[in-house]
Amino acid sequence: MGKINLEDPAVTIREARLGSITGFNGTAGELVKCAHAGKLHDCSRSFSQCLDCTSGKAFCQLSMIKDAAIVNHAPIGCAGDFFGYNFVYRVGQMQRGLPSTIGRYFNTNLEERDTVFGAVGKLKSTVHEVYDRVHPKAIFITTSCASGIIGDDVEGAANELTEELGIPVVTCFCEGFKSKIWTTGFDVAYHSIVRKIVKPPRKKTNKVNIINFWGEHIFDEMLEKLGYKAEYIVPFTTISQLKYISEASATIEICPTLGTYLGAALEQVYGVPEMKSPPGYGIAGTDTWMRELGTVLNRKDEIEEIIKEEHKRIIPIIEEYRSIFKGKTAYLTAGAAHGHAIIALLRELGFEVQGAAIFHHDPVYDNGESTSDALAQDVKNYGDVKNYNVCNKQAYELVNILNRLKPDIMIARHGGMTLWGAKLGVPTLLIGDEQFGFGYQGVLNYAERIVETLDNKEFVTNLAKHSTMPYTKWWLEQDPFTFLGGNTNVELY
Ligand code: SF4
């Protein structure tokens, strides 16, 4: 963690900047204790099945800026993620009643000869072609392993093109090999935006930045009541909107794994206060988050009133759900901060959380505040979580653990993970929208979906009967952490 440095075109990766890790086996409490003591070491795996790519995560945030274009300076295979994000973009347009347009994504198609002779010329001609074809308000150039290894001067080319075309042509250094923590890609995308798109504020406005993916607009009503206006960033914004996110009264992050860098950068560079409490999931977590919102927006009395009304409305309903879920067990898999949010929701509803497979762990966020640690808040509010595993989507570990624990339900945040629960006959619920579980209403939303999932157990029971598993009996009898290199995370002291 350190000061945001807009002079450097590249961002320091999370492993080096925040001390983030991708391997841990223990309890949530042990992880928090080690992280807060500065004694967390990564525990690498001797076998890794898959990893996601930093470039894809940068693309995830940049690809839905409505009037920008992306040039991916890479071999064509790196552009495999265009399809998925174009799909999300189109669905998002339909949900928002926007005209349907396809994403403006291009690739320089680096080939073998380019890796020998360099490909800056190819990059420049691609950017020209993109400018002529779609007339974007800005062009982001995302780099790749290949362009990084051959050492193309992408920053120099982007600066020349900016002069020539009269629009920002912005580098986004997101070579996949640089970091095992793919969320570094979010930081890189935001770094590009803050460095080259955002302008100093002309005045303060009543807007509140909401750093999110593309979830529901749940903050509109509450902020309006408080005299503020929600500005959802970055997907579905325009370049001119992004220019003045520096004028907002505050920044809210739906998930600090996503927004840590942008929230800290806007506060450090332009003085926009960043909400530091973990996002509001579960009743206790929402109370804390709401009170900080009241302080930041100078609306303490109004917030106390809302808290009182909401408790009155939801607590009796939650009590009923708790009696339904009494004695039930749950397991979850998700990205870091959102995983912590799901733990809060499940514990609030009375589930025993048997364990979690969480993709990475940031011991601290870019704001440097220990109060932002959502996992620490979970442990404080609801007690420890056993079988807390930091696991970067290694399905073989997940399947082995699930097979042992056999929870009553599995909750997943990412589509590729749900099939493993279903194949083992475990009712599995996929919820991709972070906003769905946020705040007081979010607890009820989750409860309702969980009831539906548990009511439909027969579906996964039948599915399990008729499906095969690629993992052998041999593997399922091994220690799930056979390939996690020793228990070097925990320094006993
Ligand atoms: S940038 Fe590297 S890790 Fe990412 S898709 Fe391309 S080759 Fe793979």
Image (cartoon, rainbow, N blue to C red):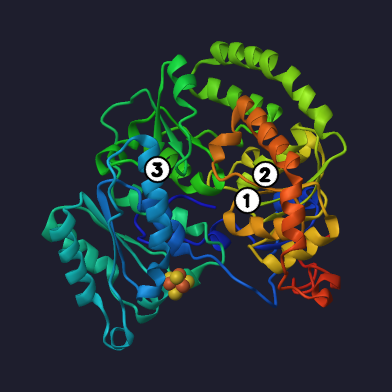
Which quadrant would residue 234 be assigned to in this image?
Answer: top left
Examine the rendered structure and indicate whether residue 128 appears above or below residue 237: below
Give the numbered dot on residue 485: none
Give SS at disc 2.
helix
Specify whether 7 is left or right of 34: left
Crowdedness near tag 3: few (<14), some (14–19) or many (≥20) residues, C-alpha within 10 Å? some
In-front residue for pair 490/403? 403
**Disc 3 residue type?**
Gly
Give SS at disc 1.
helix
Specify whether 173 is left or right of 316: left
Please give the name of the residue rendered at 81% of the width and 30% of the height, measured from the top-left corner: 324
Distance, label 1 to label 3, CA atoms, is 24 Å
Please give the name of the residue rendered at 75% of the width and 32% of the height, measured from the top-left corner: 348
Whether the residue carrying mark 1 lies under 8 Å from ligand 1 is answered with no
> What residue is shown with label 2?
340
Specify whether 414 is left or right of 225: right
Could you tell me residue 313's position as x and y percent? 67, 15
Quarter of the image that includes the C terminus: bottom right
Which quadrant would residue 211 be assigned to in this image?
Answer: top left
**Disc 1 residue type?**
Ala
Examine the rendered structure and indicate whether residue 430 appears above or below residue 23: above
Please give the name of the residue rendered at 42% of the width and 64% of the height, measured from the top-left corner: 174
Distance, label 2 to label 3, CA atoms, is 26 Å
> What residue is shown with label 1?
336
> What residue is shown with label 3?
92
Mark 2 or 3: in front is: 3
Q: How many marks?
A: 3
Crowdedness near tag 2: few (<14), some (14–19) or many (≥20) residues, C-alpha within 10 Å? many
Please give the name of the residue rendered at 61% of the width and 52% of the height, measured from the top-left corner: 335
Give SS at disc 3.
helix
